[in-house]
């Protein structure tokens, strides 16, 4: 494992092995998805445990989860290494999400009620207050953003489509975590959310779909730029 790679020491309750495993998994998964742990990097259980300041058991269990998920792979004589996602994998996930988000947002524009629009407006107002704080309240904005998306999914009233979007959520949340670190990101994203709600409010499915697709694709571009910067920094 590269000695240049750093991980935060985890303050964990030794009596909560499940929480420890989940915390290690989350840290390593994010490091893979944001490029901190590049493809081909060896994942050595002992070294990771030392870097995280914990025992090896939760590290071993977290690595097993990453392997099942396809983010790590075992090779003869090399052991477990980061397989991560290729640029094409990332592009595919974003393109699938853009198509699904566009569809569900168009459906919401067709099926919205005045009460639905009122709820979306309330969420926008709360998100606006997060943006106006200095610095912006990122944790609260993330929570509101998830509620905003869930509200649109509910208004669309398509359980099957909602289920499909949920399968992408773990990837999307990790990608978004990287984007949130970019200065100005949430303010720009908030403006795009306003355009989405404006189209839903007037019942314009075409405009709603186009606004949702633009939002997802710009999110993709910001994420890929951050990933490229991380790769260049290692070079």
Image (cartoon, rainbow, N blue to C red):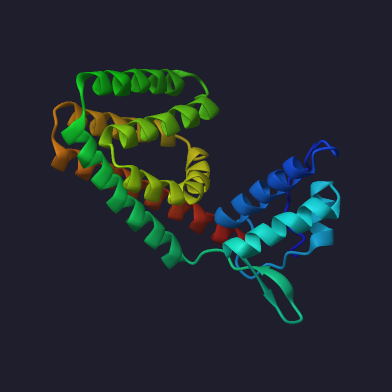
Residue 37 vs 113, above or below: the answer is below
Please identify the quarter of the rendering in which residue 187 is found: top left
Residue 4 vs 144, above or below: the answer is below
- Rendered-image quadrant of the N terminus: bottom right
Q: Viewer-proximal residue, 161 or 88?
A: 161
- Rendered-image quadrant of the C terminus: bottom right
Q: Is residue 201 left or right of residue 122?
A: left
Q: Viewer-proximal residue, 34 or 60?
A: 60
Q: Viewer-proximal residue, 225 or 198?
A: 198
Q: Is residue 217 left or right of residue 15?
A: left
Q: Residue furthest bottom?
A: 76
Q: Is residue 38 left or right of residue 205?
A: right
Residue 6 vs 9, above or below: the answer is below
Q: Residue 143 at x, y = what percent?
A: 49, 29
Residue 13 vs 88, above or below: the answer is above
Give the residue displayed 28% in from the left and 53% down from the top: 99
């Amino acid at each position: 494992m590269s000695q240049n790679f750093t991980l935060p020491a985890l303050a964990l309750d030794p009596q909560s092995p499940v929480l420890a495993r989940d915390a290690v998994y989350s840290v390593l998964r994010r490091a893979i998805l944001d490029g901190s742990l590049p493809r081909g990097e060896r994942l050595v259980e002992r070294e990771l445990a030392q870097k995280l300041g914990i025992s090896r058991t939760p590290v071993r269990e977290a690595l097993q989860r990453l392997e099942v998920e396809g983010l790590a792979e075992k090779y003869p004589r090399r052991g477990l290494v980061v397989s991560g996602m290729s640029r094409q994998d990332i592009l595919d996930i974003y393109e699938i999400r853009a198509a699904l988000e566009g569809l569900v947002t168009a459906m919401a524009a067709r099926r919205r009620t005045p009460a639905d629009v009122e709820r979306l407006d309330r969420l926008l107002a709360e998100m606006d207050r997060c943006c106006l704080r200095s610095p912006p309240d990122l944790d609260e904005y993330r929570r509101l953003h998830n509620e905003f998306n869930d509200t649109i999914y509910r208004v669309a009233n398509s359980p099957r489509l909602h289920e499909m979007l949920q399968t992408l959520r773990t990837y999307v949340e990790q990608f978004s975590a990287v984007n949130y670190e970019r200065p100005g990101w949430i303010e720009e994203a908030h403006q795009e959310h306003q355009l989405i709600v404006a189209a839903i409010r007037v019942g314009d499915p075409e405009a709603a779909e186009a606004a949702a697709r633009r939002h997802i694709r710009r999110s993709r571009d910001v994420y890929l730029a951050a990933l490229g910067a991380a790769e260049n920094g290692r070079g």
